[in-house]
Amino acid sequence: MIAGAPWAKLPIVTPAQISQARLIRHFFTGNLSEEIQSYPAYPGTEKNYLRAQIARISAATVVSPAGKFKFSEEEEEAEEEGGRENYQENEDFKGATLSELVDEELNGWIHHVQEILPQGRTKWWNPGENADKEEEENEDEEEMKAETEEIEPEQAKPLLTPIGADNDIQNTKAWTAKVSSNLIPQYACAFVRSNVWPGAFAFARGMVWENLYVGFGHKYDTKDYGPELPPIPANEYSDGPEIGEAEDPSPEEEAKARAAEAEEADEEEQEEEQEEEGEGEEEDD
């Protein structure tokens, strides 16, 4: 986008676009209609890729001070599979101190946005749920259904989980917490920087807190990026007698084969005639 240009509404992102965005790396050009040249091919243009990256970054880096939100009493008592999904603002929250927000264990900040699962959704979807149960299933369909039922659901971290529980990057924590100034602590704020998504920050001071991101839209990787390799070529067919090469028969061998086929045909005709004569005699009796 050009600075000062009108705002453009991005399209709704799909699970396939999020999953494919994890496999490629594309620098934004600013042209939302720009085609993305990548392998594997991306299902959309730059506006779709931008929306997918925003969803990924938001799900991983939008955090808030611990205690800002809480689960309702119904959610506290619920024990449904998949964990609690609804929370509300904590009216008793009076703000967090700087020491709590820069705790070494990083328990002063929590995730209040649902994590995106590997299949590109925030809630796991079983591919076999849309199968038509009224249709009769043959053996192949039953086997496919059994394989689908064996798939274990993908689990995400529960909401309001401290950021200290995020996976480390080799020997580096996923977040770094600091104070903006040690000279004037009465005016300083605490902030955390994401080491997974460079450019993602969250800051807080008293009751004020916010998230922001300024970056290239790329996730940090411990190794150099390389595009996904193409699939392994199919194996060649195995040699066998049915496809093996054979020498052409000689004229004498062909004559013998034709004579043998003619004899077999004559014997079959004689057997058929004998069967017909036997049936005729039975009818006369």
Image (cartoon, rainbow, N blue to C red):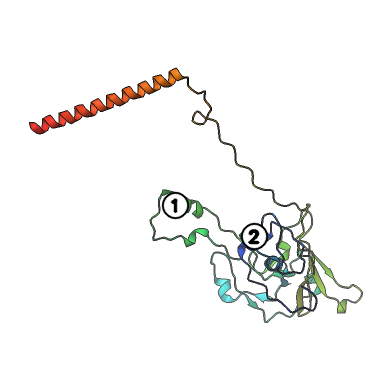
Which residue is most to the right? 183
Relative to 70, does residue 49 appear above or below in the rendering?
above
Q: Can residue 120 be seen in this view?
A: no
Q: Where is residue 89 in the image (x, y as percent from the top left)?
A: 66, 79
Residue type, numbered disc 1 = Glu
Q: How many labels does the image show?
A: 2
Which quadrant of the structure image shows residue 133?
bottom left
Which quadrant of the structure image shows residue 254?
top left
Q: Where is residue 234 in the image (x, y as percent from the top left)?
A: 60, 41
Q: Which residue is drawn at 58% across and 76% down?
A: 73
Q: Is residue 210 visible?
A: yes
Q: Do the residues labelled 1 and 2 touch (CB within 8 Å)?
A: no
Relative to 62, does residue 43 appear above or below in the rendering?
above
Residue type, numbered disc 2 = Ser
Q: Give the label on residue 71, or none.
A: none
Q: Give the label on residue 19, or none.
A: 2
Q: Give the label on residue 141, or none.
A: 1
